[in-house]
Image (tube, helix red, strand yellow):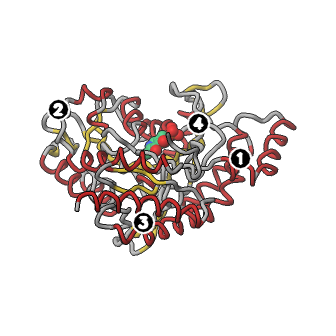
Amino acid sequence: MANPTKIAFLDLVTPHQELQEELLAVVKKAFSNAGFIGGPMVEDFEKEFAAFCGAKYCVGVNSGTDALRFAFMAAGVQPGDIIVTVPHTFIATTEAISQAGAQIAFVDIHEQTYTMDPAKLREYLETRCEVNAETGELIERASKRRVVGIVPVHLYGQTADMDPILELANKYKLFVIEDACQAHGAQYFSKKDNTWKLAGSMGMAAAFSFYPGKNLGACGEAGAATTNDPAIAARMKMIRDHGQAKKYYHDIEGYNGRLDSIQAGWLSVKLRHLANWNESRRNHAHRYHELLAEVKDAIVTPVEASWTKGVYHLYVVRVQDREAFQAALAEAGIGTGIHYPIPLHLQKAYENLKCKKGDFPVTERVAAEIVSLPMFPQMTNEQLHEVAKKVKEFVGARVSAVR
Ligand SMILES: Cc1ncc(COP(=O)(O)O)c(C=O)c1O
């Protein structure tokens, strides 16, 4: 039987206890004026988060999924249009594509970064699509559908390689909407512009999730979209609020997708700590890298490409015998997770896409081997050592068993 949990995969209790007074003050403020929807707390948070992301506008919504969906709708996606993304992501990325009326096309990830492989994107755009000489639109040959956009996912807190993705998007007149739901504060070095850029500032728009376990988490459901385009921001604001720009004047049908004022107030409190929390995550990741270096032949630790400064939403390693690995850690009271075990193209929900095993081999290999180790800002040095010790013990026992 597994030991009682000694090192949780994620500790959400400590940060809330540490910030309890400030968080409760937000509730008292909301109770004092019954401002529960919209209002200054939402507007203030939107300004603060836009500034944090280096974007001009932020639109608070009630989940990362809605942020993606509203961004696609604001970008003018039409029924049947194709949006290209990766099969190695949380299903919300593709749910939002379908819910906006679009079709999903997948391209594989890069073996080291686990994010969209620009070479695979190029291959898809160049070999499976063609530009219609009359309209200038990019058409997928097999389906005859328009390809309109690309969604790179900044998975585990590291940005996708954006320069080549943006260059291809520019060439084929496609929008890029960043799925930054796991990457609050992650940075990308653009060689093209010779400068560091923040996740959420590079595409036509970007989506963030504030699901409680994220680097910036609400105390419930919440999300936001960022953009530098005032027209896209205005459109997303309408869509989140029943299609109205003015009360009871509905230009379009929209959704009930607003951000609660109390959640916004809580997010403002936590945003003040996010840079420090991200720094702690980076330090923990580097400590893990060092501690696990001696078993690097048996376990693959995360690779931070030269063009990214990751915020380590997750610390994901690759091992051969995953089930036994997780069982050994559970036995020692250490929590782990798998993000994500079944690639999207092989999920039952996407049988209609008629994909088969082998279609996206890098995603499939990665999905079979990944394990997320405990990672949260409040982790102690002792906890990091303890996890690394148990990982090394497991690997050591396997190596001597094989000899
Ligand atoms: C990569 C990715 N995209 C989208 C989402 C959706 O965010 P939410 O759960 O806030 O709807 C998540 C959240 O888990 C995510 O990790």
Crowd around label 3: few <14 · some 14–19 · many ≥20 (10 Å): many
The residues tagged by marks 2 and 4 sit, at their Cα atoms, a distance apart of 34 Å
The residues tagged by marks 1 and 3 sit, at their Cα atoms, a distance apart of 28 Å
Q: Earlier in the sequence, mark 4 or mark 1?
A: 4
Q: Earlier in the sequence, mark 4 or mark 3?
A: 4
Identify the residue position indicated by label 3 in the image. Answer: 188
Which amino acid lies under the numbered mark 4 shown in the image of this protein? Asn
Q: Earlier in the sequence, mark 2 or mark 4?
A: 4
The residues tagged by marks 2 and 1 sit, at their Cα atoms, a distance apart of 46 Å
Please say if 112 is above or below 258. Answer: below
Which amino acid lies under the numbered mark 3 shown in the image of this protein? Tyr
Does residue 386 appear anywhere in the picture?
Answer: yes
Identify the residue position indicated by label 1 in the image. Answer: 266
Which amino acid lies under the numbered mark 1 shown in the image of this protein? Trp
Which amino acid lies under the numbered mark 2 shown in the image of this protein? Ser
Which quadrant of the structure image shows residue 118? bottom left
Residue depth check, mark 2 versus mark 3: number of the one nearer the observer: 3
Could you say whether the residue bearing mark 2 is in a helix, strand or loop?
loop
The residues tagged by marks 4 and 3 sit, at their Cα atoms, a distance apart of 27 Å
Q: Which mark is residue 143?
A: 2
Please say if 46 is above or below 277. Answer: above
Could you say whether the residue bearing mark 3 is in a helix, strand or loop?
strand
Crowd around label 4: few <14 · some 14–19 · many ≥20 (10 Å): many
- The quadrant in which the C terminus is found is bottom left
Residue 12 in the image: state x and y as whole percent.
63, 47
Could you say whether the residue bearing mark 4 is in a helix, strand or loop?
loop
Q: Are marks 2 and 3 in contact (CB under 8 Å)?
A: no
Question: Any atom of ligand 1 within 8 Å of the CB at mark 3?
Answer: no
Identify the residue position indicated by label 4 in the image. Answer: 62
